[in-house]
Image (spheres, rainbow, N blue to C red):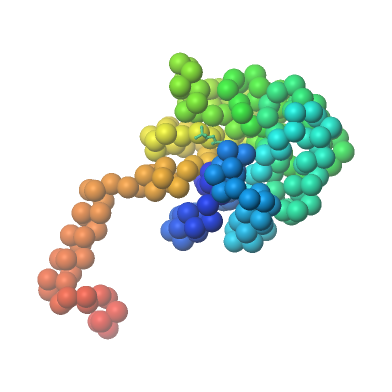
Amino acid sequence: MKLLIDDARLDEIKKIYEFYPVAGVTTNPTILSKIGGNPFETLKKIREFIGEDAQLHVQAVSRRAEKIVEEAWHIAKLLGTNTYVKIPAVPEGFKAMKILNETSEIPFTATAIYTPMQAFIAGQCGASYAAPYVNRIDNMGFNGLTVAKDIQQIFERNFMETEVIAASFKNSQQVLELCKCGISAATLSPEIFIALVKNFAIDSAVEDFISDFENFAGKDKTMLDFQ
Ligand code: E4P
């Protein structure tokens, strides 16, 4: 499972990149609205930091297919390769996906997915990824994990190349459940990223090892102090 960061705050992105394996960054209009200003200033800084090999997912916001297609070209031109244009999985979005699929090499991610059939249609339209919103689906009284797993199964059983990038998590257990099923990718807020391996028992075990070593070798001594 590839792990991406669902955030546009460069300082938070840098903190996660320093410690964890990260495949890229996803954003959405709400995330960008929290930064404000020219969205491309924010996005270019993210691209510069993560490099051209990492994925950057950026959403188009037009309501009509033709305009979504124009936005896609614009986003891809300004942010380079490995930029995935997020397109909502609604009828105008499907139309835009079909046009892009037939006329460009621009990769796109079907977003705002609440039902398996949205993902199936987006996959047929050539989407590289489909993004089910796990937590938002839960909040509607359905099971977000089940929806994400169903989508994965639909892609596999229909021999489709579209991958699942699960989104909208509220805890690390949801991520674990999808990891166990081999879901291709998940995009996480920095808080959930950190929560994946945050555990007092782990910290305490590591501290015990260090203090046991220091007890016989001396304070701040490490293996480097011995031959
Ligand atoms: C995914 O594409 C969205 O950017 C995001 O994960 C939605 O998350 P939220 O439900 O926490 O806003």
Residue at the extreme top of the image, as rendered? 141
Query: What residue appears at the point 78 percent right and 35 percent down from the top-left corner?
Result: 68
Q: Quadrant of ligand 1?
A: top right
The one nearer the camera, 200 or 181, is 200
Query: What residue appears at the point 25 percent right and 82 percent down from the top-left corner?
Result: 226
The one nearer the camera, 210 or 110, is 110
Residue 156: x and y, percent? 62, 28
| Rendered position, 137 above or below 43 | above
Q: Is residue 174 left or right of residue 212?
A: right
Residue 38: x and y, percent? 67, 51
Residue 20: x and y, percent? 45, 55
| Rendered position, 17 above or below 98 | below
Count how many numbered circles sit on residues in the image. Answer: 0
Pick the quarter of the image with the C terminus. Answer: bottom left
| Rendered position, 32 above or below 112 | below
Query: What residue appears at the point 66 percent right and 49 percent down from the top-left corner?
Result: 39
The one nearer the camera, 124 or 35, is 35
The one nearer the camera, 204 or 193, is 193
